[in-house]
Amino acid sequence: MSALTDYEGMLAAIKMGDEPPAEEPARQQWYMKKAGELVKEKSLSLGRPLRAMVKTFGCQMNERDSEKLRGILDAAGYELTEEEEADFVIYNTCTVRENANLKVYGRLGYLGGLKKKNPDMVIALCGCMMQEPEVVEKIRRSYSFVDLIFGTHNIYKFAELLVTALENDRMILDIWKDTDKIVEELPASRTYAFKSGVNIMFGCNNFCSYCIVPYVRGRERSRRPEDIIREIEGLVKDGVVEVMLLGQNVNSYGKNLPEPVTFARLLKQVEEIPGLERIRFMTSHPKDLSDELIEVMAESKKICPHLHLPLQSGSSRILKIMNRRYTKEQYLALTEKMREKMPDISLTTDIIVGFPGETEEDFQETLDVVRKVRYDSAFTFIYSRRTGTPAAVMENQVPEDVVKDRFDRLLALVQQIGKERSARFLGQTLPVLVEQVNSQDASLVTGRLASNLVVHFPGDASLIGKTVDVTLEECRGFYYMGYRAR
Ligand code: 5AD
Ligand code: SF4
């Protein structure tokens, strides 16, 4: 973990008056220092350091939010751990599909047991699931040992909420319906020293009819380009060589800023940052993907030749009911255009099977797109009914056995094509950014090609964060074995 050491200096300089300042981020910095005092006091009385763990469910946005939670816990003096036997445990939850919720309830029962053994333990829940009133009600009723609950809009206030939870015995609840606020300049503790997610926007305005995200993440808000650039410059100074620009729909970045900017223009600015080697981004909505973006990608030396472009369904009829605002033909035309300009680009996608009313013919259209586009990989999901979304109340929900059968057929096709696509680099020598020592064989290291494919090759920890040329000797399905080129 890489902590932000200069943050310690900043906190040391804060004078603790009786009242916290009203403006941000000064207010949160004041609370971080306050939390530090409380943690120190407790740690002295117990005669040991206090430990905190953050567990993430769901997407890369949540991963990034968790790094911010860890940054604040670190600044408050907790030792960060991966284990739930800790003094402070927070689950950053996801609710995009039902099974994400079920996992959280399962783990919560276990946490309750741990708290019986360590009554001082503080248990907190945050993230998308907490934006659903039924969920919060259920936790109040059945998991009353939880100390702190907050949602997605006020995560920047975590230091303040932490202090409130440490100073009170009752359950602290703070959930906002929406926000137009973006607070800059809070610390983050990164999982990887050499790569980082960077939020460029929050929320979603698309309201795809199956999706709960717009309800739990609120309206689209873009960060100002100068704030994003400053953050990335700081990350690069701190050793980062790869950034992943994050947003639910990066292609509509900047539309609502006082001085509108396109995503493509932002990318051009990011490209100019010296020392930055690789730029990735996610997620793109096909309806907003511009020619300008394709051009910028094609000309760029740093933007990875990889595009994650969720299809969801190949049937124009279903796409319309999904409120996706493109047809099968438009989607195919878009991917053809990408391949024309960037023949080697990797395309990946998300597909939902069993959306209400999906027929075998609709499903065949999905298989047809998969065959035509030839994705490098695809995340396939069984449609999950989310209360509050328009699709949840649609009639003709597809029977489970039919969905399962379609899911299996889709997965088989996606995997077969993915394997064929992955093999296209066999024998080539390509740059690999090394991420870690191989978890199974310590004589190997593991890294990624620009296309995002994983490569294992002989090496040691000194290579982590470096980009080296590797000859791809053997393709084993979705990854390569290789050796360092001389
Ligand atoms: N059921 C199944 N999959 C869903 N996704 C979003 N909502 C649902 C749902 N209700 C998938 C979409 C999206 C990905 C992040 O999750 O494919 O692109
Ligand atoms: Fe959900 Fe659609 Fe927004 Fe993606 S674009 S988060 S699928 S509503």
Image (cartoon, helix red, strand yellow):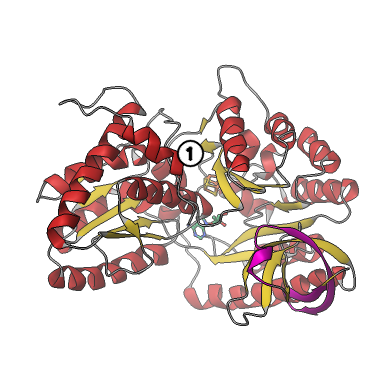
**Does 481 appear in magenta?**
yes
Observer-nearest of 468 and 349: 468
| Residue 212 visible in the displayed image | no
Percent position of residue 358, x then y: 58, 62
| Residue 298 visible in the displayed image | yes
Task: Name which residue type carries label 1.
Answer: Gly
Instruction: Specify start and end residues of the magenta stretch as a single range.
Output: 460-483
Percent position of residue 346, x then y: 78, 58
Observer-nearest of 13 and 359: 13
Percent position of residue 71, x then y: 40, 47
Percent position of residue 103, x then y: 36, 68
Residue at x 75%, y 76% (from the top left corner): 416
Residue at x 42%, y 31% (from the top left corner): 183
Tell me the element at label 1.
loop
What secondary structure do most residues of the magenta stretch adopt? strand
Pointer 1 residue: 203
Q: In which quarter of the image is the C terminus?
A: bottom right
- Relative to residue 7, is residue 111 depicted above or below? below
